[in-house]
Image: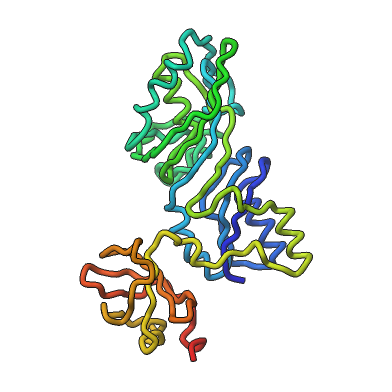
């Protein structure tokens, strides 16, 4: 079984738990997720199966969307609502004051990964060190936050909240965004809710719950399984000349006259590209150089399957 499942991960399960459940349900060994979500966090978790595991790096590298709630005035040792409260400082400024600082957190910014993250420093995952009560220096990393959109402002009481949507690059930490936002206002803050609504090309609207996937398996259907090339939707789509298909599948490069562009709006010079035959079958991923030659890098069809 080859393909990608857009899973709606429930709270209370680790990403590894989801993969283990699907491995048993679908009776497969070649399976893996494309970006860890904390156990408490629900949302989109693409899971690759079979040959589609070769697509994992492209899904992981794609942008992410989140719905987030920030609570101002309370900081925790984990930067979210599950940690131990460190400080409490009632808010004495307006909601507009809080919103006015948002431009400082959009575009290319630097973030220091939280100690509860899976980032490795010196070969150790930070969360493993945090469980031992340790905190170490972590180098700041550049991330991109393309957009922050306030959804709902609840400016009541000493510790008000704002719900907002974020469009960002991989590796962006919402808990750190909340903590940094609160620090910039002098009151501190923590992330009180998080939902991942998009990962790469996969959206919340068409995600499948584990119960829905299990029901489909019971019916003998696999509607939940999307084709491998769905994981690289943003790459240019090229069609290989019929007489060069077998050569491509055997690892030989294509010259510029051996293919044509099927999706002109996404065309570019040096890049990864998706390669198809003239019947629309997805064949491979390749790297195209500035001269237009393409070297196959990830082949998804055996040459023996082409007649």
Give left or right: position of 53 versus 290.
Answer: right
Q: Of all residues shown, which one is farthest toward the right?
A: 218
Above or below, 292 relative to 120: below
- What is the number of callouts on the image? 0
Image quarter of residue 106: top left
Above or below, 168 relative to 183: below
Q: How is the image coloured?
A: rainbow
- Let me know if residue 51 appears in the view: yes
In the rendered image, residue 1, in percent from the top left (x then y), is placed at 62, 71
Give left or right: position of 182 versus 206.
Answer: left
Observer-nearest residue: 242 or 289?
242
- Let me know if residue 77 appears in the view: no
Give left or right: position of 59 versus 270.
Answer: right
Q: Of all residues shown, which one is farthest toward the bottom?
A: 307
Report the residue at 60% width, 59% height from top.
5
Report the residue at 60% width, 49% height from top.
205
Report the residue at 62% width, 67% height from top.
29
In the rendered image, residue 240, in percent from the top left (x then y), is placed at 37, 80
Observer-nearest residue: 208 or 80?
208
Image quarter of residue 131: top right
Report the residue at 62% width, 46% height from top.
14
In the rendered image, residue 133, in percent from the top left (x then y), is placed at 53, 29
Q: Of all residues shown, which one is farthest toward the left?
A: 291
In the rendered image, residue 220, in percent from the top left (x then y), is placed at 75, 69
């Amino acid at each position: 079984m080859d393909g990608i499942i857009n899973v709606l991960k429930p709270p209370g399960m680790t990403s590894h738990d989801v993969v283990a459940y699907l491995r048993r349900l679908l009776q497969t060994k070649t399976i893996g997720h494309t970006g860890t979500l904390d156990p408490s966090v629900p949302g989109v978790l693409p899971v690759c199966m079979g040959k589609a595991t070769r697509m994992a790096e492209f899904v992981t590298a794609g942008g992410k969307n989140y719905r987030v709630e920030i609570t101002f005035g309370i900081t925790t040792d984990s930067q979210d609502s599950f940690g131990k409260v460190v400080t409490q400082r009632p808010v004495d400024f307006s909601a507009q004051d809080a919103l006015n600082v948002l431009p400082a957190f959009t575009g290319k910014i630097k973030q220091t990964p939280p100690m509860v993250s899976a980032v490795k420093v010196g070969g150790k995952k930070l969360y493993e060190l945090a469980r031992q009560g340790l905190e170490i220096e972590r180098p700041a990393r550049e991330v991109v936050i393309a957009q922050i959109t306030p959804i709902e402002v609840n400016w009541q009481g000493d510790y008000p909240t704002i719900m907002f949507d974020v469009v960002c690059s991989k590796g962006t930490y919402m808990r750190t965004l909340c903590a940094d936002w609160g620090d910039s206002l002098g009151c501190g803050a923590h992330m009180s809710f998080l939902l991942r609504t998009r990962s790469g090309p996969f959206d919340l609207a068409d995600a499948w719950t584990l119960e829905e996937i299990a029901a489909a398996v019971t019916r003998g259907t696999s509607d939940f399984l999307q084709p491998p090339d769905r994981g690289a939707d943003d790459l240019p789509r090229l069609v290989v000349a019929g007489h060069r298909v077998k050569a491509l599948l055997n690892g030989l490069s294509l010259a510029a006259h051996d293919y044509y562009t099927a999706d002109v709006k996404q065309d570019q010079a040096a890049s990864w590209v998706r390669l198809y035959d003239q019947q629309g079958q997805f064949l491979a991923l390749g790297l195209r150089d500035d001269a237009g030659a393409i070297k196959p890098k990830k082949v998804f069809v055996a040459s023996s399957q082409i007649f």
